[in-house]
Structure formats: C-alpha cells, structure tokens
Amino acid sequence: VQLVESGGGLVQAGGSLRLSCAASGLFFNSYAMAWFRQAPGKEREFVAAISRNGGSTDYSDSVKGRFTIARDSAQSTVYLQMNSLKPEDTASYSCAATLTTRTERLGHLEYQYWGQGTQVTVSS
C-alpha cells in the first residue's frame, strides 16, 4: 500500500494550495480518508476526513470554512483544497486511510496507512 502526497509548497498568507494524495495497493472505495498535520514541536492534529463514498465530511474547527476535502474514486485520490491560508497552517500534511467503519471522528491511531507528508509553509 502506498499513499503519496503532493502539492505542498510556500505560499503567502491569504493564498491557496491544493494537496493531493494518490493511493495504490488498496481498494480505495473501502477506505475512509483523512488529512492530518504536524508542526515542529507540536502534536499531530486532525484536519479533515471524508467517508468511503464521499457523502460525509468532517473538519477541525481551525480549518472549517477554509479547507475542503474531496475524493475521486476513479483516480484513487483524495484532495485537500486550502484557501485563505494563515501562518498557523504551516505544517507537514499527511493523508491517512482507515478501514474502520465507525462514523465519529477518529484519532490518528485508528488509521492503518499513512503517506510520507508534504510540507506547507505560509508566510506572513
């Protein structure tokens, strides 16, 4: 199984980025997907999640209204559209996949597969 993120980079505050996570080696439609982030010296933080069929999404309060998670089953890819970026969004962003069928927000330990992360840096 591989999850490969891309799309990170350096952007000014107020700008936008779109992250992608391409999945392979798994039956994509069986997995709920999520994005987490981790800044230096801080704990890993939940950002957003999307259900298997894309019909349900969940966002942390810190990104709600600015970020949008989506998935494309034909491409086995999950996206994170990030708008109105702030310096506090600076972190390494990782995608994760889980077979867990529970519908509540899951902690990072509930996810079986992880990507290597892509760095997002927002300058003020």
Image (cartoon, rainbow, N blue to C red):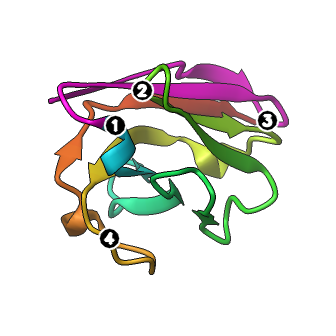
Task: Please name which of the two marks, 3 or 1, marks the residue nearer to the observer.
Answer: 1
Other-residue count near label 4 (Cα within 10 Å), few / some / many at <14 / 14–19 / ≥20: few
Label 1 close to label 2 by CB (< 8 Å): yes
CA separation, marks 1 and 2?
Answer: 6 Å
Q: From the image, tell me which residue sits under label 1.
A: 28
Q: Position of residue 78 (x, y in %)?
A: 50, 34
Which residue is disc 2 drawn over?
76
At a point 47% along the width and 19% down the height, the residue shown is: 75
Residue 6: x and y in percent read: 45, 19
> How far apart are labels 4 and 2 at the CA level?
19 Å
The residues colored magenta run: 1-27
Relative placement, left or right, of 72 versus 96 is: right
In the image, what residue occupies the spot 33% across and 32% down?
117
The mark that comes first in sequence, 3 or 2, is 3
Most common secondary structure along the magenta stretch: strand
**Dividing the picture into quarters, in which one does residue 56 lie?**
bottom right
On screen, residue 58 above or below 27: below
Label 2 Cα neighbours within 10 Å, binned few <14 / some 14-19 / many ≥20:
some
